[in-house]
Structures are given as structure tokens and as C-alpha cells.
């Protein structure tokens, strides 16, 4: 069976969930070979092996930390040359998509970004994408070179499938461009204790109907009861009620959780584009004619300041 390269997104050896989802998809089209770079790369091996990686190629060098994406592109090209894979898979993070695009240019291959599903085919893997603000689904195949595909988080289940996970060092030669852009400082992002927005299984979002920054406490309380991430519409972000990093929509982040709860959000196309692929959508809005109700699986017509606290209390009661 052909091998499939999987780029590993990890933090000091802790593998992030989208990578484990990629391993599930990679097993559909071949044997996963993981590529882990930077500090803690070897520590990823047990987790990757547990989820189907037959091999783990590792490399650590100061360049991966001290400079921007080009050193990682050099490493992925080295892995590509060593393996000759049937496809190369990346999570659809901002950094990984840049690495994927640069790799595709180097190896002369087509690229598909933000896939939401992947299946095997005799002519090469076929990717499903949600396009035109999620109004359509397309099925695409790369027609030139080795497919380079980025996949949105929450597009596949995380499934255990124990494999050898043999660790092999990856020899990387850095080109002149690798040190062209140096990282001069880093500031840790303040932790909220909540899941990362694009990776969360549940997202609770608030919009214009929240009517003030202080009222987002209602949204946060429901999110915390569910172990969810907090999102916001562009209207709420533009009003200064919540940080831009939490914006869901065409000009914010795209999410595809198992459950999306929209409170006080009208459902403009700008917002729908960022959450329309969610598996189950629930909306709370006092306007029965709000466009969001055309999209939802479950809708509640009512005042969010009455409905959401009741829902929070019910969740807490059922938990304990």
C-alpha cells in the first residue's frame, strides 16, 4: 500500500487533535507516515503510533524555532523525496496551509485546501470541499503531481488504530531562504481554559443580540458548562464586545464542530460562511424571521437572556 505523509501539528511533543484526524483520513488512502519537526518531535511517536502511523520521521533544529515556515518546507520536501508518497496531508491552520502551498510549488503539484472529507479512488484521493460560503459541496482530485491537501479540523473522527510507529531521523538540508525571516519575539497567548475555537467539538457563539461586552458572560457560562469554545459574530467583534480572535465567519475563523449554538445571531451570509458545515446547529433568537432559522437543526424563538441561562442550568444539573 502506498504511503501518505502527514504533517504533525504539536506543541513540545503534545499532538494536537487535527493531526489525529488526519491519520484517520490517511488510512483511507494508504499507510500514514508522520512528519514531526522541532522540539519534542520524538515524544509524539507513541501517540502517532496509537492512531495509525507506521513510521514517524523526526527532525529537530534551531531553524524550526528561530525562523518562519521555510525551514519546515525544506523538511517536508526532504520527507517527500525520501518517501515518494501518494499524497501529503496538512491540517488547515494558517501556518500549515502556507507550508503546504510552498511545498506544492516546489514539487510541481496541485493543492486542495480546506477539505472536509477524503476518500480513496483508483486515480488518486478525492477531496470534498464546502465552497461559496458553504452553499455548495465539490469533489476534487489533483490532476498533476502528488496531491497536497489541507483538511479542516473536525472533518473526521479520531480513531485508535495501533501501528508500528517506527521512529526514523529525517535528514534536512536548509536552503538559503530558510533563514530569511527571523522570529524576534514570542508572547504566550493568555489561556482561557477553553478549547481552541477551530478545533472545539462544541462552539457557543454570541452576536448583536448579546447587546454588550458584559453580557457575554451568559455565553461564556453556557460554553463552560458544555466544555465548549466561545465564538462571536462580526457585529459583536466590530462593536468591541469580544476579541477578533474569536470571530466566526467569512472574515474570521471557519469552524466545523459537532454542535454549534448561535445566540442572538441573525445569520447573515458572512457568519454562515464560517459555521455552516457544523454537524448540528442550534439557534436562539427572539426574531422568528431571522435568517439563521433557515439553517438550523433546532431553533428556539425567545430572549437569549432567558433561554441561555436555563439551558446552562439544565446542562449543569444533568452533569451532576
Image (spheres, rainbow, N blue to C red):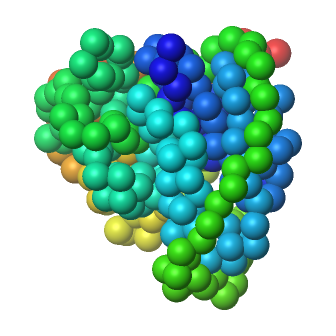
**Near-viewer residue (91 or 287):** 91
**Near-viewer residue (15 or 306):** 15
In the image, taking residue 111 as reference, residue 226 lies left or right, namely right
Q: Is residue 195 visible?
A: no
> Which residue shows up at 32% across the image and 23% down it?
125
* Position of residue 50 measured from the top left corner of the image (x, y, whole percent): 76, 20
**Near-viewer residue (202 or 290):** 202
> Which residue shows up at 25% across the image and 44% down it?
110
Which corner quadrant of the image does residue 268 belong to?
top left
Q: Is residue 110 visible?
A: yes
Vertical position of residue 242 compared to residue 97: above or below = below
Vertical position of residue 130 compared to residue 24: above or below = below
> Which residue shows up at 35% across the image and 52% down it?
107
Q: In which quadrant will I find the C terminus?
A: top right
In the image, taking residue 220 as reference, residue 295 lies left or right, namely left
> Which residue shows up at 69% across the image and 56% down it?
171
Vertical position of residue 60 compared to residue 226: above or below = below
**Near-viewer residue (118 or 198):** 118
* Position of residue 2 measured from the top left corner of the image (x, y, whole percent): 48, 21
* Position of residue 166 measured from the top left corner of the image (x, y, whole percent): 78, 29
In the image, taking residue 112 as reference, residue 58 lies left or right, namely right
* Position of residue 260 measured from the top left corner of the image (x, y, whole percent): 44, 30
In the image, taking residue 161 as reference, residue 294 lies left or right, namely left
Q: Looking at the image, how many numbered discs can be counted on the residues?
A: 0
Amino acid at each position: 500500500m502506498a504511503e501518505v505523509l502527514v504533517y504533525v501539528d504539536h506543541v513540545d511533543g503534545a499532538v494536537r487533535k487535527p493531526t489525529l484526524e488526519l491519520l484517520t483520513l490517511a488510512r483511507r488512502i494508504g499507510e500514514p507516515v508522520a512528519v514531526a519537526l522541532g522540539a519534542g518531535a520524538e515524544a509524539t511517536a507513541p501517540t502517532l503510533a496509537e492512531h495509525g502511523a507506521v513510521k514517524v520521521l523526526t527532525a529537530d533544529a534551531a531553524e524550526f524555532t528561530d525562523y518562519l515556515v521555510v525551514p519546515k518546507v525544506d523538511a517536508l520536501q526532504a520527507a517527500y523525496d525520501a518517501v515518494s508518497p501518494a499524497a501529503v496531508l496538512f491540517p488547515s491552520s494558517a501556518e500549515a496551509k502556507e507550508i503546504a502551498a510552498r511545498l506544492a510549488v516546489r514539487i510541481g503539484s496541485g493543492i486542495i485546501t480546506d477539505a472536509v472529507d477524503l476518500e480513496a479512488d483508483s486515480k488518486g484521493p478525492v477531496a470534498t470541499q464546502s465552497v461559496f460560503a458553504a452553499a455548495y459541496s465539490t469533489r476534487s482530485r489533483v490532476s498533476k503531481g502528488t496531491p497536497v491537501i489541507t483538511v479542516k479540523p473536525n472533518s473526521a473522527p479520531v480513531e485508535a488504530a495501533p501501528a508500528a510507529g517506527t521512529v526514523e531521523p529525517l535528514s534536512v538540508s536548509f536552503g538559503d531562504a530558510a533563514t530569511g525571516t527571523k522570529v524576534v519575539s514570542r508572547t504566550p497567548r493568555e489561556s482561557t481554559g477553553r478549547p481552541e475555537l477551530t478545533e472545539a467539538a462544541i462552539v457557543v457563539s454570541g452576536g448583536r443580540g448579546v447587546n454588550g461586552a458584559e453580557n457575554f458572560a451568559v455565553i461564556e457560562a453556557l460554553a463552560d458548562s458544555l466544555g465548549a469554545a466561545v465564538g462571536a459574530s462580526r457585529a459583536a467583534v466590530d462593536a468591541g464586545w469580544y476579541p477578533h480572535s474569536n470571530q466566526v465567519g467569512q472574515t474570521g475563523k471557519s469552524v466545523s464542530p459537532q454542535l454549534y449554538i448561535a445566540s442572538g445571531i441573525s445569520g447573515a451570509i458572512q457568519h454562515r460562511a464560517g459555521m455552516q458545515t457544523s454537524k448540528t446547529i442550534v439557534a436562539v433568537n427572539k426574531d422568528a424571521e431571522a435568517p439563521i432559522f433557515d439553517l438550523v437543526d433546532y431553533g428556539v424563538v425567545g430572549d437569549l437572556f432567558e433561554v441561555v441561562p436555563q439551558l446552562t442550568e439544565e446542562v449543569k444539573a444533568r452533569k451532576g
